[in-house]
């Protein structure tokens, strides 16, 4: 898979070329060209902001389809913790698991259980001095990508252990294959996701060489299928599910990962623009007394994911019922049993910011950018296809835009040209002037 | 390029007692340095040192000015104010030494780490100060 795969793509037919998305993109990764938005692959972190913003639903998160399940003889579902809160007609976690079984999944392994394993390993890490503080969660793939692109100084702080989804995938496959004596190649592990970036994390992972997940289905894809099954479930048919407890399930909402830890020195930030603010402060060393930072690209955490169906606030309210009905911990594997939970690839900074590899040239470009900014109207209207006048100035020095892309500059130039033409028009060459005089005389 | 070489200069006004916008200058400098492709470890050292100086200007003087000069050889910032001046620079360089008033400390600033941190992160730190006249702090980080 190429380095710059990302799951968020554009449906050209639906795109009207409006400028809503370019303004919301936290990494300024979108431009409008020839009446259509284009995503700059190198800069996109798959946060999903544009999916939410687009009024024409032209931004799509690529995920696998229901038909992809048939590629495998056996199918395992990995429900994200946020799946439990999507349904008004699912009174318990067991109802959700049962509905997945009824849809033909041979085995269900809760990602919430993977989350509890991550919590347990994180607790262990926080007892040692092995990480630069504060340790930053690596559970949100959009945040990991943001750090890789824009905050290289924070790479040492990033928790270098596999995500709950990966932990769950490893254990699920192992458990299922051992129990049923089948070959792993016959088994497809499908993550059921509220998140666009998880697809990228599977196809083009950061920190691990290959994902253990075989496919990603969006919650949108499974929602109605599950809804119908949930209506049929009778309570006596419910499976025994003591896999994950409240701590793992609570990961669905913002703050869940942080509060599960054994430390009070936690900071939880959600919403990609807020995450960026916190990372800026971290880079200034101005955040003290924090051991662990949970950062979620989506407001509300995974429940606010762009592929979730239920309203985030309604879903968050539903987390409460799990607090009452579930034990604090589930059946999580002891961390000593979990092998190879660490990342196996280094995270290497990808510099998409610098104007030039040669510093003198970069300085020249920067100077030009500053003087271009003075020429531009500072209205940030977006009509040029760039998110702001500053971004246009940068595009110009990078050679991907022209100053006349700005309609105000263009208008100024046209006006000047018109004035010059008028001035020229009033002057006649002497010869013609003479003829005119003669004509007039006759 | 000529004899003077390539240079980027930036100027900022630092507002007095404005803790909300304190740090904006160093944050803008950081963005600029990223665009110029400066090594990120050096950006971090330079901008933290500058941030500390900026905060000091907000706390102790009634604001001031920052002048940043970037060349392919070094990063330099001169932060000047017309504040009360530092009577004893040697003491001010000691960790934990602070003359910040109580209300500033309550806000989590003024822990006496400003100048020591600047020294820690800068390659060169020059502090010129005259009581009743003001202070000029010059921070330099070399690129090679």
Image (cartoon, coloured by chain):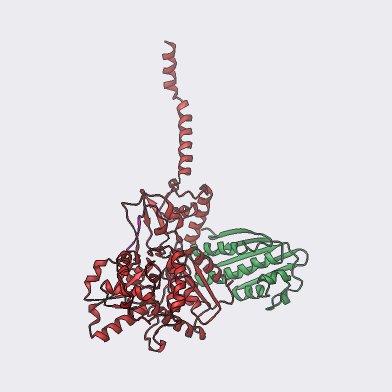
Chain colours: A red, B green
Snapshot quadrant of residue B26: bottom right
Residue A439 in the figure: left or right of residue B62: left
Q: Position of residue A112 (x, y in %)?
A: 40, 77
Residue A86 in the image: state x and y as whole percent: 39, 67
- Residue A359 visible in image: no
**Front-most of residues A109 and A21:** A109
Relative height, residue A88 to residue A161 (above, below): above
In which image quadrant can residue A237 be found?
bottom left
**Where, quadrant-wise, is the C terminus of chain A in this rendering?**
top left
Q: Residue furthest bottom?
A: A336
Q: Nearer the viewer, residue A286 or A176?
A: A176
Rendering coords of residue A182 (x, y %): 22, 83
Which residue is at the front of the view, B75 or A374? A374
In this view, A367 is above or below A125: above
Q: Which residues are magenta?
A: A54-63
Q: Residue furthest right?
A: B132
Q: Is residue B1 magenta?
A: no
- Is residue A58 positioned above or below B85 on the image? above
Q: Position of residue A153 (x, y in %)?
A: 50, 72
> Which of the two residues, A296 or B78, is positioned nearer the viewer here?
A296
Residue drawn at x 47%, y 26% as measured from the top left: A427
Q: Residue at x 48, y 48 (%)?
A: A381
- Tell me how many marks there are: 0
Q: Is residue A28 visible to the viewer in this orientation of the structure?
A: yes
In the rendered image, the quadrant that contains the N terminus of chain A is bottom left
Question: In screen coordinates, is A416 left or right of A164?
Answer: right
- Majority SS type along the magenta span: loop
Left or right of residue B117, residue A350 in this image: left
């Amino acid at each position: 898979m190429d380095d710059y795969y990302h799951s968020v793509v554009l449906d050209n037919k639906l795109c009207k070329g409006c400028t809503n998305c370019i303004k919301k993109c936290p990494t300024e990764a979108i431009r409008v060209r020839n009446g259509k938005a284009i995503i700059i692959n190198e800069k996109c972190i798959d946060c999903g902001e544009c999916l939410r913003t687009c009024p024409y639903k032209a931004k799509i998160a690529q995920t696998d389809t229901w038909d992809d399940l048939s590629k495998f003889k056996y199918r395992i579902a990995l429900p994200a913790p946020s799946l439990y809160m999507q349904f008004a007609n699912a009174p318990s976690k067991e109802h959700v698991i049962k509905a997945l079984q009824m849809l033909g999944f041979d085995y269900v392994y809760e990602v919430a259980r993977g989350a509890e394993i991550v919590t347990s390993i994180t607790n262990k890490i926080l007892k040692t001095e092995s990480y630069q503080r504060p340790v930053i969660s690596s559970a949100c793939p959009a945040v990991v990508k943001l750090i890789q692109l824009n905050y290289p100084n924070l790479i040492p702080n990033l928790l270098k252990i596999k995500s709950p989804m990966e932990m769950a995938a490893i254990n699920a496959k192992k458990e299922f294959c051992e129990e049923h004596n089948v070959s792993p190649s016959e088994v497809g592990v499908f993550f059921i996701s509220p998140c666009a970036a998880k697809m990228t994390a599977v196809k083009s992972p950061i920190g691990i060489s290959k994902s253990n997940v075989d496919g990603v289905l969006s919650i949108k894809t499974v929602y109605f299928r599950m809804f119908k099954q949930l209506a049929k479930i009778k309570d006596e048919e419910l499976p025994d599910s003591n896999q994950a407890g409240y701590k793992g399930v609570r990961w669905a909402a913002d703050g869940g990962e942080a509060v599960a830890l054994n430390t009070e020195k936690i900071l939880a930030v959600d919403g990609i623009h807020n995450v960026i603010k916190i990372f800026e402060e971290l880079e200034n060393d101005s955040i003290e007394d924090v051991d662990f930072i949970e950062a979620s690209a989506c407001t509300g955490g995974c429940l606010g994911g762009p592929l979730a169906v239920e309203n985030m606030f309604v879903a968050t309210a539903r987390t409460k019922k799990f607090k009452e009905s579930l034990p604090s911990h589930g059946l999580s594997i002891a961390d000593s049993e979990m092998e190879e939970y660490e990342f196996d690839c280094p995270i290497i900074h990808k510099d998409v910011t610098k104007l030039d590899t040669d510093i003198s040239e970069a300085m020249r470009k920067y100077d030009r950018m500053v003087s271009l900014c003075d020429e531009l109207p500072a209205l940030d209207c977006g009509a040029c296809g760039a998110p702001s006048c500053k971004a246009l100035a940068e595009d110009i020095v990078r050679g991907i835009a022209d100053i006349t892309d700005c309609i105000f500059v263009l208008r100024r130039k046209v006006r000047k040209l018109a004035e010059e033409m008028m001035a020229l028009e009033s002057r006649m060459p002497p010869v013609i002037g003479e003829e005119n005089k003669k004509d007039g005389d006759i | 390029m000529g004899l003077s070489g390539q240079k980027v200069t930036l100027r900022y006004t630092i507002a007095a007692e404005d803790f909300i916008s304190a740090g904006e200058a160093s944050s803008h400098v950081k963005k600029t340095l990223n665009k110029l492709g400066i090594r990120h470890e050096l950006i971090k050292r330079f901008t933290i040192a500058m941030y500390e100086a900026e905060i000091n200007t907000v706390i102790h003087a009634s604001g001031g000015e920052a002048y940043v000069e970037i060349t392919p050889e070094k990063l330099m910032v001169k932060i000047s104010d017309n504040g009360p001046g530092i009577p004893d620079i040697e003491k001010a360089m000691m960790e934990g030494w602070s003359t910040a008033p109580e209300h500033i400390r309550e806000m989590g600033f003024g822990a006496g780490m400003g100048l020591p941190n600047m020294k820690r992160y800068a390659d060169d730190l020059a502090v010129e100060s005259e009581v009743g006249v003001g202070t000029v702090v010059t921070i330099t980080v070399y690129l090679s």
